Image (cartoon, rainbow, N blue to C red):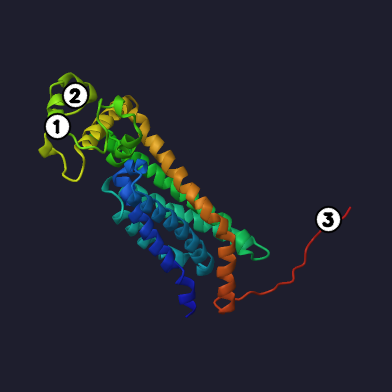
Amino acid sequence: MFLFKKIFFGIPFILFFIVYCLSLKNFLQNPSLILSVDHTVITQFLFLTFSAFFTMFFFVIFATLCDGWKIFLSTLPTIFLSSYLLTPLSLRVIFSSVTCILFILLYASLQKKLDGYITFRPDILLAPSIKQGITVLLLVSSLSLYFSEQKIIQQRGFSFPPGLIETLVQFFPKDQLLPGLSPNQDISQEQLEEVKKNPQLLEQLGIDPALLDQQKIPDNQPQTLVILTTSLQNQMNTLIKPYASYIPFLFSILFFFTIKFFISLLSILLGSMLTFIFWILAKTKYVTYITEVRTVKKLVV
């Protein structure tokens, strides 16, 4: 029972860390998801935010209660395997190793703090360690995303997500894309033939003439939406191409500050959550508090 008390909070810590690695994997495999406005991507951002927050929340509680390096070190193989198996192949060794070093340093820092405190106040004593751990974890993740996007650009180049382009098309002045076409209207065969007769315009807009073949256009989308989306996407990709080398850095910065913003909102409740958790633990006799009387030395002139 005594050992169970020491390892219990390691279970939610490991589970939330696995969820974090799974959520992060999607962004490492396709960093351009950061620019997407699709609801599924927003859901992935929320999963990433909550899992990062509660990973460090339960890690700090686990590190506080495990009371010893042996129990903590026994979790490192699970941490390493989780981050190793749930991240892209090219980043596995680096991300897993750095993550393990991160948790070792956080544990050592927390133990030093726990050895020197006078009055146990979880909101004051533990909250800074949780925030520090989240920040460092996000920095490691942002650095991994930087290398992932850099490799993708070197191999395939950069292209804006179709979902973002489709959203922009709805607000883009239609006469700046293709004259007389509106995104949500259907285009007649006569209009298609008229557009096909102007190959200079198609070349200027970067539209493949084969796209104007109705058989190439999905049945559930208006032809003009596909044409305008392709036009705008090609124009934007051409515009950003000279600056492609800066995209990994911008993505990593955007990723870090986006998650950091959402976590800062959760952190408003962090002190209250810690106080409540340890109040419950004390009421259930999971932990006990002792009062000590100490002799202090003061300087008097």
Residue at 54% of width from left, 65% of height from top?
Answer: 64
> Which residue bears the numbered disc 1?
212
Residue lying at the far right of the rendered structure: 301
Circle 3 packing at 10 Å, graded few (<14), some (14-19), many (20+), is: few
Visible in this render: residue 12?
A: yes
Residue 242 percent coordinates (x, y): 32, 24
Task: Please tell me whether mark 2 sits on a helix, a strand or a loop.
Answer: helix
Camera-side mark, 1 or 3: 1
The residue that mark 3 highlights is: 299
Distance from disc 1 to disc 3, alpha carbons, whole Å, reads 88 Å
> In the rendered structure, which amino acid carries the disc numbered 3?
Leu
Residue shown at 56% from the left, 74% from the top: 280
Q: Secondary structure at mark 1?
A: helix
Q: Is residue 12 above or below residue 219?
A: below
Q: Secondary structure at mark 3?
A: loop
* Residue type, mark 2 in image: Leu
Q: Are marks 1 and 2 in contact (CB under 8 Å)?
A: yes
Real-space Cα separation, disc 1 to disc 2, in angstroms: 10 Å
Nearer to me, 64 or 198: 198
- Looking at marks 3 and 2 on the same chain, the residue that comes earlier in the sequence is marked by 2
Residue 5 at x, y percent in the picture: 49, 75
Residue under the point 55% across and 64% down:
273
